[in-house]
Amino acid sequence: MPENVIVTSALPYANGPIHFGHVVGAYLPADIYVRFRRMRGDHVHFVCGTDEHGVAITLKAEQAGKDYQAYVDHWHKEIRRTLEELVGIRFDAFSGTSHARNPHHRELAQRFFLDLLHNGYLFEKTEEQFFSPSLGRFLPDRYVEGTCYLCGFDEARGDECPRCGKYLDARRLANPLCTIDGQPPVLKATKHWYLDLPKLKQEWVQGWFEGKAADWKANVKAFVANDLEELRERPETRDLPWGVPVPLPGTDGKVLYVWFDAPIGYLSISKQYFAERGEPERFERLWKDPSTRLIHFVGKDNITFHCLIFPAMLYGTKAGWIVPANVPANEFFQLEGRKFNTSTGWFIPEESVRGRFSTDALRYALCTMMPETADADWSWKEFQARVNADLNDNLGNFVARSLRFAERFLESELPPLGQPAPRDREILAAAGAAAADMAAAFLRFEFRRACQRLMAFSSECNRYYDEMQPWVLRKQDPARCRQVLRVCAELVHSLAILAAPILPDTAQKVLGAFLPAHDDAGRPSLPPGPLRVQPLPTLFTKVEDKVVEEELARLRAVAKGGTAAAPAAPPARKPDEKPATAGAPQAAAPAGAIAYESFAAVELRAGTVRAARRHPDADKLLVLEVGLGSETRTIVAGIAASYTPEALQGHRVVVVANLAPRKLRGIESQGMLLAADDAEGKPRLLTPGPGTPDGAKVK
Ligand SMILES: [Zn+2]
């Protein structure tokens, strides 16, 4: 019986590029699973989109001086492109949670809130929260960073710790500092709505989880069991200017917490999808049918929300929504032993892989390295080994040698399968066994095992070919030779079908070798009659040592410098172009290296923009008042093309503090700001890290 399956991939935050660490956690395994389920005949609905609310976004948009919507629009497009083009993820529905992108989201999230309130699972409470007196605003979540009170990580955010993955109470952080101005925040009372998780746990969550857990992955079970112990009430609203408004009177300036509204995005994006197809009734039919299997693919950092909080919310609405059947979360994925970090350069830039390796090569290698049960690593040497040894020398080799032989010596014509010899029957049965093992692995979310099984079967195929020696049979027993090649064609076809969820493009190409073309990837075997095959262009290209060495050298440079040495560095400024900042005299860049002393003579300090206005006599200039701790400087900067004066309020900057003052269009500039051009050539200010007080020396 075909099943109805909803598969979701964690909604990526629309606040930065997506990297392989994300891809391998929640997107690639979901896509493989979806393709496998479809081949089985199940009805699958694959949903994703961008998470467009929350402090992760407001903070970065403010730092970039961008409007919130424009900011999330940019990343929405980028993320979708990366997932679709780089690794071939094919969603059914891909949208987002901002009102402009998805008109169904706000209404549905508010309905969840009101249902939970009505059912007594949300309660109101006035509590003290962090507030910045200098900025005059509350500092929810990532507006505060400090030391994690659970694991000691010193860049823990106000709402969660990136290292231990735990939800945090900001007030318990050690050394809390505002991420905008680096100052210690104060506490101020504010009213919020809390989800009564202890009540939900007692009433339903605990029993549900214990009943479910038998089928769940061990790493997920262990994580959740631990979290269940510590389940406390959590505030589900925030004082923020961007998000889903709290649907109650007198709550201006309050929005739903991003973790409350984001998972509802799975439903609202699905609702939008069916509405746009003119079948709005299918949305609730699917999401309220108890036989629908809901599977959430997420990374480790999303386990608690998808395994406890969101199911509790779905249950607590009492609206009949289904709850997840499984949450096959992965562990963390690192790059050559260190955490991916796009801001330091410790990641794999798209330029390093795009156009260089096929989508399938990346999918396969990532799949073999997947952090299914423990943290795992992208290693360039491992990538090379998997592509060269598995795809090229094993699978690719068997397909190529079989089809080429048939073309060269048998005019591409193969006889009916007829009565296979015992050894033929044995290898054909091996295909069936591989199919059964791989299906079981996919259903248990064991994608690495599925890859291993595929390659083990491909090795058996190569062994059969070597044993049969068709090049000898061709002369000694031409009829047997034809029969052997007919069996090989059968095996090539099986390999394509088995590989299809992991290697979709390759499978499509290989199936194209059989005439008439078989476009139905789900067909279990070839028709038994005579067969015509045609050779294929090379399926895989070997990864050369040179490529691996280049990539490792790039990472070594990043590790040494501690900062990005991007592979495709933007071209150096041409001599006739204006410098990024016009706050001080600029000399032409020196051609050679400088002595350390020359650099050390430049005094760089962290600061915060206290006020900003347009220069009365120059369109390109802004006049800023910049706080450096003990003093405030007036700085004239040529950044009006990139920032509005409003956006700069509270912006952290790096100031060249010992430049001789200089008048710019009548106003004296007492320093210069550091900036780097963005992709469009507009200057973007450099920002000191969180926790750096004003006046701190930059070195
Ligand atoms: Zn921690």
Image (spheres, rainbow, N blue to C red):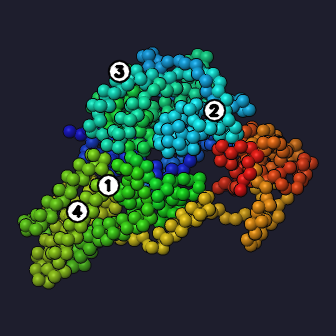
Q: Tell me the element at label 2.
A: loop
Residue 293, position as x, y percentages in the image = 30, 36
Image location (x, y in percent) of residue 689 = 65, 47
Q: Position of residue 417 (x, y in %)?
A: 12, 65
Amino acid type, label 4: Phe
Crowding at dot 1, Cα within 10 Å, few <14 / some 14-19 / many 20+, comes out as: many
**Can you identify the residue that label 4 sits on?**
457
| Mark 2 residue's CB less than 8 Å from ligand 1 | no
Between discs 3 and 1, the one toward the N terminus: 3
Q: Please identify, in this view, whether the residue under mark 1 or under mark 4 is nearer the observer.
A: 1
Label 4 – label 2 distance at C-alpha: 56 Å
Q: From the viewer's side, name the closer residue of 555 and 584.
A: 555
Asked whether 150 or 388 is in front, the reply is 150
Tag 2 residue: 139
In the picture of the structure, the residue carrying the numbered disc 3 is 203
Q: Residue at x 39, y 46 (%)?
A: 330
Three-letter code for the amino acid on which mark 2 is drawn: Leu
| Lower sequence index among marks 4 and 3 | 3
- Residue 357: image quadrant is bottom left
CA distance for labels 1 and 4: 14 Å
Seen from the viewer's position, the closer of residues 367 and 632 is 632
